[in-house]
Image (spheres, rainbow, N blue to C red):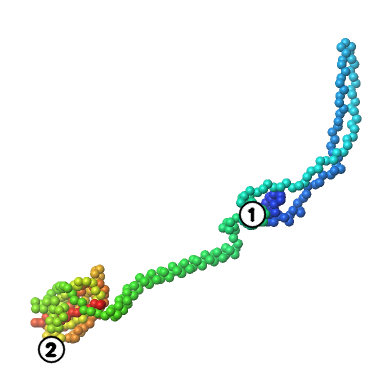
Amino acid sequence: MRSCSTCGAQVARGEDFCPTCGAYLGWDKGSEPEPPAPDPSAPTARIPVLPPKAPAAPEPPAEPVAEPEPAQPAAVQPAKPVAPRPETNAPVEAPAAEGPPCGACGAPNPPERRFCIRCAAPLVPDSEAPQSNRARRRRRRIDRGKVWRRLVVLAVLIVLVIGGVLLYPTGREIVEDVLDKTFGAAPIGPVSSSASGEMPDHPRGKAVDGLRDVYWGTERPGEWAEFNFDHPFRLVGVLVSTGPSRKDEEFRSQARPSRLEITATSSDGRTRTETVEVPDSPAPYEVRIKTSDVIKIRVRIETVTGLAEGKHIALGELEFFGRK
């Protein structure tokens, strides 16, 4: 084993790249210390060889035998020098690595390595590999751009929604007015009527019969007449004729309404009320009141002109016009 000169990790002999940092280690092979070669002239250890002992003489059974003198050690002959057994210095091959192959060169690598043992290519996926500062800055800029674009789109949608809510009535009226002018108007007759008061000879129906010299008569201001229609329609105007007749000499023979309150009721219950000042003239007066889905119209007399003793209020004609 040897140490990486960059990060200090332990590297097996024969590997050219560090398994931890991927540094190339081929330049450090020449600096590794070689094991010392054996010296053939060095003396080897010698073991003294003793001569075999002679068998002891049998003791005589009867006669005492004197103890022999102790034997002197024999001289040791010098041994011949023996050359040491040669040792091989061939490097031991590292066991073959087992693991996923490198995507660049195909060499197998241990699972814990981050760089290839043969070509030093990165072994971790791109999603796990550390990104450079430039890549991180680019991604931050892209993310900020997406956020700003989303905020701009959201602001535009909010403005459109608010504008639609605020301008919807105005826009609808503009469209309806264009349609009114495009298709024109036609008279619409009621199917039924009611009134809060009327003269015996001048009932409320005389105000919508289409005749000019008959009228709806009432005794006092504040009376009203209500007219119902068989289907909803777009009301575009009301034509009002006051007085008992359109002839000048007969026009002022009775009192005339000077201010009327006209209320249109739609099919969904919504109402629209217009208060109009009617000129004291035998000519018809046009009241522009526009609303949709009208099913009922009430006309109330607010103030009158020429009311005196022996006279009553005369409302000559009411004509309702709807869009064709």
Q: Label for residue 304?
A: none
Residue 256 visible in the picture: no
Question: Among all residues in the image, which is located at the extreme front?
Answer: 106
- Quarter of the image where the C terminus is located: bottom left
Q: Give amino acid for label 1.
A: Gly
Check disc 2 and give the amino acid type. Answer: Glu
Residue 106 to residue 165: above or below: above
**Mark 1 sits on what residue?**
106
Circle 2 residues within 10 Å: few <14, some 14–19, many ≥20: few
Dot 2 falls on a residue whose secondary structure is: helix
In the rendered image, which quarter is residue 240 located in? Answer: bottom left
- Residue that badge 2 annotates: 249
Query: In percent of the image, x 87 and y 16: which residue is there?
Result: 58
Q: Quadrant of residue 288?
A: bottom left
> Could you tell me how far apart the alpha carbons at marks 2 and 1 are, in whole angstroms?
119 Å
- Among numbered discs 2 and 1, the one appearing first in the sequence: 1
131 versus 191 height, above or below: above
Q: Residue at x 57, y 63 (%)?
A: 136
Is residue 54 positioned above or below 168 on the image? above
Q: Position of residue 106 (x, y in %)?
A: 64, 54
Q: Is residue 229 left or right of residue 53?
A: left
Which residue corresponds to the image point at 88% horizontal and 10% vertical from the top-left?
62
Q: Position of residue 130 (x, y in %)?
A: 59, 58
The residue depicted at 89 percent of the width and 11 percent of the height is: 63
Asked if residue 294 lies left or right of residue 219, the reply is right
Question: Residues at badges 2 and 1 in contact (C-beta under 8 Å)?
Answer: no
Most extreme residue toward the top is: 62
